[in-house]
């Protein structure tokens, strides 16, 4: 088993041939797989089959997917931290007003049009209310 570095100098991805025709691309704790079926194309498994004519492009596709997913996770964490910080600065009266507004919005969804996804929206509102009460 030979460990190779990614063709992209910017990332610290490593790829390993785990068995004939199968490679694993690792970046941090994330892993993607590349396979090479009989027809000679490399397939990068990045949530779908991404076909490539050479191994370096398949490795780059896996590396790009991992970096994108890590970026999204970091962005979500940053937004979550900002929301928690803003909730911590709210006064109890402001929290109660926000909870009352959300509860009224949830109750109005009982009378919403049948084409609206009320179950999902009610669940999202319930999570927001729980978040306000928990802080």
Image (tube, grey):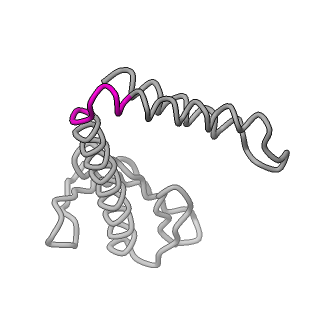
Most frequent secondary structure within the magenta stretch: helix
Looking at the picture, how far across and down is residue 110, in whole percent? Answer: 76, 34
For the question of whether residue 1 can be seen, the reply is yes
Looking at the picture, how far across and down is residue 118, in whole percent? Answer: 72, 39
Residue at (47, 33) in percent of width and height: 128
- Most distant residue in the bottom direction: 53
Looking at the picture, how far across and down is residue 125, in whole percent? Answer: 55, 35
Query: Measured along the vertical axis of the image, is residue 29 above or below residue 42?
Result: above
Query: Measured along the vertical axis of the image, is residue 127 above or below residue 59?
Result: above
The image quarter in which residue 106 lies: top right
Query: Measured along the vertical axis of the image, is residue 134 above or below residue 110?
Result: above
Choose between 96 and 130: the one closer to the eye. Answer: 96
Q: Which image quarter holds the C terminus?
A: top left
Choose between 130 and 63: the one closer to the eye. Answer: 130
Choose between 7 and 97: the one closer to the eye. Answer: 97
Looking at the picture, how far across and down is residue 86, in whole percent? Answer: 25, 41
Q: Is residue 133 found inside the magenta-colored segment of the image?
A: no
Q: Which residues are magenta?
A: 88-95
Residue at (49, 62) in percent of width and height: 36
Residue at (63, 40) in percent of width and height: 121
Q: Is residue 20 left or right of residue 118?
A: left
- Most distant residue in the right direction: 114
Choose between 52 and 65: the one closer to the eye. Answer: 65
For the question of whether residue 17 can be seen, the reply is no
Q: How many marks?
A: 0
């Amino acid at each position: 088993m030979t460990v190779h570095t990614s063709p992209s100098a910017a990332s610290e991805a490593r790829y390993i041939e785990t068995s004939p025709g199968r490679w694993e691309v690792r970046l941090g704790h994330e892993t993607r797989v590349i396979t090479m079926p009989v027809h000679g194309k490399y397939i990068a498994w990045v949530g779908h089959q991404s076909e490539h004519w050479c191994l370096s492009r398949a490795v780059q596709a896996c590396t790009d997917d991992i970096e994108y997913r890590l970026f999204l996770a970091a962005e979500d964490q940053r937004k979550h931290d900002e929301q928690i910080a803003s909730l911590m600065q709210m006064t109890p009266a402001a929290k109660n007003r926000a909870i009352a507004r959300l509860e009224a919005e949830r109750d109005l969804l009982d009378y919403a049009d049948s084409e609206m996804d009320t179950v999902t929206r009610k669940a999202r509102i319930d999570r927001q209310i729980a978040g306000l009460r928990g802080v």
